[in-house]
Amino acid sequence: MSGTYPVASNRICLTLVTNLSSAMLVKPCMQIRELTKSDALEYRGLRLRALKEYPTVFSSSYEVEREWPLARFADRLAETPGSTDAFMLGCFVEDDLVGSLGFFRYEAPKEMHTGRIIAVHVAAEHQGSGYGRAMVAAALERARRISGLSTIQLTATTTNEPAKSLYASFGFEICGTTPRAMLVEGEYIDEHLMVLKLD
């Protein structure tokens, strides 16, 4: 459930997002909600742009995913709605999808205490506006409500200082580094594993 309330001007809005659990007030004219298969076209565009513009950040590639049919992106989004243990959030500004973030919980019995944030991205022209922070906050708020979840992991390339700083501000700590985690156009990319303990 969401509602739009005018403040100061009819052209400025504040959106209350309540379907992530307790109501959360977010930035003017911004809405964070779970993506569904009906968002597949916009999600595909944002995802392909991210892969093309930031090839050293994602393990997948533009060349691979541009060949995927739209139905494959729709199927990816259709897997998560209503799920407690996995979701894909989208950040909308003036009804345009400008950011996305994925989360899943490990399924193995000895790993079910751990969740993972993946594929965090904000379109270049919207970076620095707080949208990435809002998505991470929304994801953590929802993850904290998952019974038995005590640890959240994510990875960040060692040179991605803005991402590392953002995650650290939420309490994530670097607990290890994977040398040569990716090989992109002949260049090895190292990755940090970052962990947040919820208990």
Image (cartoon, rainbow, N blue to C red):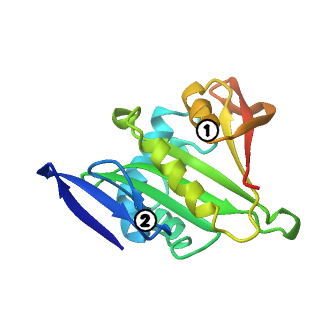
Image quadrant where residue 157 sits: top right
The reply to whether residue 66 is visible in this rendering is no
> Which quadrant is the N terminus positioned in?
bottom left
In this rendered view, identify the residue nearer to me: 41 or 132. 132
In this rendered view, identify the residue nearer to me: 163 or 118. 163
**In the rendered picture of this protein, how many numbered marks are placed on residues?**
2
Q: Is residue 185 left or right of residue 35?
A: right
**Residue for badge 2:** 23
Point out the frontmost of discs 1 and 2: 2
Residue under the image location 74 percent in, 44 percent down: 195
Residue 181 in percent (x, y) is at 75, 35
Residue 74 in percent (x, y) is at 46, 67
Q: Secondary structure at mark 1?
A: helix
Residue lying furthest right: 110
Residue lying furthest left: 10
**Residue for badge 1:** 167
Residue 93 in percent (x, y) is at 29, 50
